[in-house]
């Protein structure tokens, strides 16, 4: 556990000393401010616009960071051969993978916390109070970010950053479109398409975690729903990390 | 010798890579067996592409052997207990360039679970030992090639290892740096540690090593103490000093020689032994005066070149399945361990 944290800390340090991350963060920051401006412009519903855009920005940039760090940071250790020295130390390869994972989460969490703080200030500024439901939505977006990071890490344990990025993004999109896929599945008559759609349904359903719209429209989200979504996501994360570590442990580093 | 297991025990280790679309076979290491004992400085030699790095990577658990196994301290080399007692410097190292020298060493020290009080003392001492005190707060991005090599060596010693494995530790170092590394290696040996390193710098190897192995094309060709291996070579060449030859005769004699040490009327020439008879006969026939005749000791370079030449007609590790096992040329006998201390 200790070694895992040492690796996580080093990953975090690498990420925050990387300039790309700051530019992503900067754009997220701009978008949040823009959501305020757009909210002010749209008569009547302005607070809804701010909330909606704000939550979307937090989710979008969170996912962007998840994919970016997830596909690049492990590959970088292999590519630059820093891994040779690291794996000659008394650590298991799975400790390395998990250490990387937690380091990436730490990076994403820091970013998310800052954006959430800014978002809260904007909402407070506009409506003088802030409802806890918004934080429920952000919590599930956070779960989604953790899941997408684990998927990116899974792919980067055996393929290149480019393919890891493409695969991860595809799974993200499919996951978000799961309700539509389920409808299509009932309607299609083509067996091949049916099979493809059927296979897709084994991927994580990210629609469960996307409750931004519902929250913005004042729907209240029961505790049961939160609990089952968190559990559901955690199971997938464990699965991806497990197979990621397994594949990584069997690899030759040449 | 004693009941202790050897520090390194490599048994029938082989590694094949598959490359390209047709999955062509590259036999980078073939049936390699060798042992290294406690307190030895062991040199692992071979021309480019001989399989040294591949072997070392298998020892480190970075790649998995196709066949055979490697044990360190009597336990499988990928066991964490073995790694805890091990220091490693990879070939052409590249490190986290966003860390400073201090942060870098502290990072590895923490992976070994070294307590913070010991850690700070040890990190400072190592940084000093490799001559980087002035650059300790500089990010590695700003280090020169030789400085990276030095911090890499410091990193390999962070856990006070019993076995240090270095892949070309001298590469990229200036003469002072090479001497520093030699001193570090001697100091390690003096404190009872074992050092295993690959190198192309044969002078360093001659100065440092107790035993060496020579690998070409993935196979072990020579293994033994430096002393015994070089003794085998002695008697290959002889140095002759003579006088009293006319310029014309001298020129004729020189054509038989390998090397001219001192030219002129009183000349010193080196002859390979197979031409020695002929040379001496010619010298005496022409009325020259033989002043001295010294059999030359072989150098490690001679041995190295001899081994590479002897195996250069063998197929390279890159080959088709069909021509998998050609007969070995006559002059390559399987390596035999030349006996160490009695
Ligand atoms: N990943 C790989 N894929 C295919 N072939 C490889 C791979 N790594 C090494 N080889 C081949 O294995 C052989 C041994 O390579 P290795 O790097 O072990 O040599 P070396 O003795 O360390 O050489 P050098 O002195 O140049 O460092 C070479 O023929 C090389 O081409
Ligand atoms: Mg090499």
Image (cartoon, coloured by chain):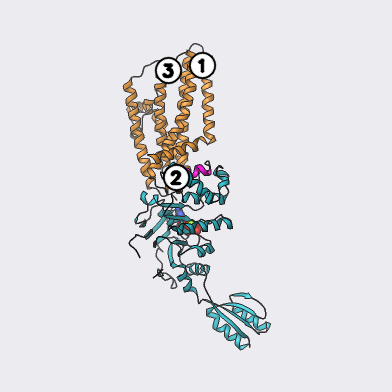
Chain colours: A orange, B cyan
Left or right, A19 with reference to B159: right
Q: Residues within 10 Å of mark 1 (few under 14, many from 20)?
A: many
Residue behind mark 1: A39
Distance from mark 1 CB to nearest ligand 1 atom below 8 Å: no
Q: Nearer the viewer, mark 2 or mark 3?
A: 2
Residue B77 appears at what percent x and percent y? 37, 53
**Which span of residues is magenta-colored?**
B92-106
Pick the front one: A188 or B133: B133
Residue behind mark 3: A216
Q: Nearer the viewer, mark 2 or mark 1?
A: 2
Tell whether label 3 touches label 2 (CB within 8 Å). no
Q: Secondary structure at mark 3?
A: helix
Residue at 40% of width from left, 36% of height from top? A151
Q: Quadrant of the N terminus of chain A?
A: top left
Distance from mark 3 CB to nearest ligand 1 atom below 8 Å: no
Magenta segment's dominant SS is: loop
């Amino acid at each position: 556990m200790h070694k895992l944290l040492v690796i996580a800390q080093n990953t975090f340090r690498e990420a925050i000393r990387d300039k790309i991350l700051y530019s992503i963060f900067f754009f997220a920051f701009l978008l949040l401010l823009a959501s305020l401006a757009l909210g002010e412009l749209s008569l009547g519903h302005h607070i809804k616009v701010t909330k909606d855009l704000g939550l979307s920005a937090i989710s979008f940039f969170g996912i962007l960071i998840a994919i970016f760090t997830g596909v690049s940071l492990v590959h970088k250790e292999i590519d630059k051969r820093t891994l040779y020295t690291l794996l000659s130390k008394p650590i298991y390869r799975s400790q390395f993978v998990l250490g990387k994972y937690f380091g990436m989460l730490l990076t994403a969490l820091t970013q998310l916390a800052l954006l959430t703080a800014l978002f809260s200030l904007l909402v407070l500024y506009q409506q003088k109070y802030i409802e806890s439901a918004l934080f429920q939505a952000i919590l599930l977006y956070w779960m989604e970010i953790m899941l997408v990071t684990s998927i990116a890490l899974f792919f980067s344990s055996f393929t290149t950053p480019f393919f890891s990025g493409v695969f991860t993004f595809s799974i993200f999109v499919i996951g978000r479109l799961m309700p539509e896929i389920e409808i299509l599945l009932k309607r299609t008559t083509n067996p091949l398409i049916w099979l493809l759609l059927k296979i897709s349904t084994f991927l994580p359903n990210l629609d469960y975690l996307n409750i931004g719209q519902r929250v913005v429209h004042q729907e209240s989200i029961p505790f049961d729903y939160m609990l089952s979504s968190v559990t559901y996501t955690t199971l997938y994360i464990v699965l991806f990390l497990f197979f990621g570590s397994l594949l990584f442990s069997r690899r030759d580093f040449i | 010798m004693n009941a202790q297991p050897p520090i390194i025990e490599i048994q029938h280790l082989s590694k094949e890579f598959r490359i390209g679309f047709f999955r062509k076979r590259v036999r980078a290491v073939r049936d390699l067996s060798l042992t290294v004992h406690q307190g030895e400085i062991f040199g692992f030699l071979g021309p480019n592409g001989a399989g040294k790095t591949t072997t070392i990577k298998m020892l480190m658990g970075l790649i998995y052997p196709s066949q055979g196994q490697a044990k360190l301290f009597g336990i499988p080399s990928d066991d964490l207990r073995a790694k805890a007692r091990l220091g490693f410097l990879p070939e052409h190292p590249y490190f986290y360039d966003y860390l400073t020298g201090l942060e870098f060493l502290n990072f590895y020290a923490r992976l070994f679970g070294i307590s913070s009080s010991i850690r700070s003392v040890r990190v400072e001492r190592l940084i000093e030992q490799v001559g980087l005190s002035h650059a300790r707060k500089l990010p590695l991005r700003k280090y020169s090639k030789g400085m990276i090599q030095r911090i890499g060596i410091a990193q390999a010693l962070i856990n006070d290892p019993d076995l240090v494995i270095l892949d070309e530790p001298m590469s990229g170092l200036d003469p002072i740096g090479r001497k520093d590394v030699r001193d570090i290696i001697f100091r390690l040996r003096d404190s009872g540690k074992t050092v295993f390193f690959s190198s192309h710098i044969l002078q360093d190897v001659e100065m440092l090593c107790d035993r060496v192995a020579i690998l070409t094309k993935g196979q072990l060709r020579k293994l033994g103490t430096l002393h015994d291996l070089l003794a085998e070579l002695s008697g290959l060449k002889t140095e002759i000093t003579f006088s009293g030859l006319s310029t014309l005769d001298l020129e004729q004699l020189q054509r038989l020689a390998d090397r001219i040490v001192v030219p002129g009327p009183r000349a010193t020439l080196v002859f390979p032994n197979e031409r020695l008879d002929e040379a001496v006969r010619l010298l005496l026939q022409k009325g020259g005066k033989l002043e001295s005749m010294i059999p030359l000791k072989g150098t490690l370079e001679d041995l190295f070149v001899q081994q590479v030449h002897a195996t250069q007609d063998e197929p390279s590790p890159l080959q088709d399945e069909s021509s998998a096992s050609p007969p070995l040329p006559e002059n390559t006998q399987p390596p035999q361990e030349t006996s160490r201390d009695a």
